[in-house]
Image (cartoon, rainbow, N blue to C red):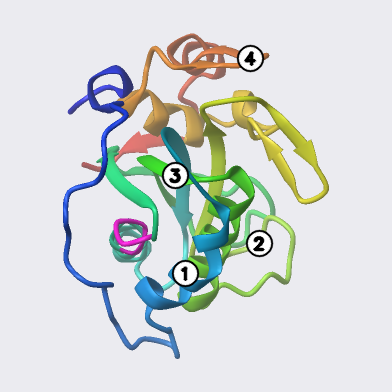
Amino acid sequence: MRSACAWFKLVPPKPRRKGWRRNRAGAADVGGAVARLVLSGMSALWRPAYVAVGSNLDHPGARVAEAFERMAVLAGSRLEVRSRLYRSEPMGPQNQPQFVNAAAGLLTQLTARALLDALLEVERVMGRRRQERWGPRIIDLDLIWLVGEPIDEPGLTVPHPAVSQRNFVLYPLADIAPMLVIPGRGRVVDLMNLAGGAGLSALA
């Protein structure tokens, strides 16, 4: 598996297939819908971005795999690397299924705001409904860090404010970018060791 240093190159993307389509739970064509959503938020510079992925409903491992496929066809972005899958205990109410977690490494021309909007659109077409805080969810995509300047705006904070406290984010992230330095927090591998692996197990 490649590290962040290995796959981060400021190069144009290779041609790829058209947007991935799947009719499920009323989901739309992500290739088209997200393309229209984000085209105004692009720049010429390709930057690494890191996304935490989680699910605990409707065959969670399959939903995480679906999220990877949908991120792979986001406009102005490339999915470059993905972590192993991990099983974790729910962080909120305990009367819900365990989670399956992973991390994705992308190269993107999108701004942080545009990338966040694109990830929220992926959640929407996969059937995410925001009801109970820390409750069960079919998919959860969190923008952990987009290389550049930290951002703290209404509805957008990068690095993610809770990254250093969540082993179910740090262990998958360490699979793909162990030496990544998250501003104001430290190296991913060091944060992972501090967080410890309680309640977490690797699936694949």
Residue 185's tag is: 4
Q: Nearer the viewer, mark 3 or mark 4?
A: 3
Residues at marks 3 and 1 touching, judged by CB atoms closer than 8 Å: no
Position of residue 2 measured from the top left corner of the image (x, y, whole percent): 20, 26
Query: Label 2 is placed on what type of residue?
Result: Gly
Q: Earlier in the sequence, mark 3 or mark 4?
A: 3
Query: From the viewer's perspective, is residue 36 above or below residue 204?
Result: below
Q: Is residue 14 left or right of residue 161?
A: left
Q: Position of residue 114 (x, y in %)?
A: 58, 54
Q: Quadrant of the C terminus?
A: top left
Q: Secondary structure at mark 4?
A: loop
> Is 71 included in the stretch rendered in magenta?
yes
Query: Going by the image, does 181 lie left or right of 152?
Result: left
- What amino acid is at disc 4? Arg
Q: Which residue lies under the disc numbered 3?
A: 109
Q: Residue at x 53, y 15 (%)?
A: 191
Residue 145: x and y, percent?
55, 32
Residue 34 tag number: 1
Query: Which badge, 3 or 1, is on the more N-terminal residue?
Result: 1
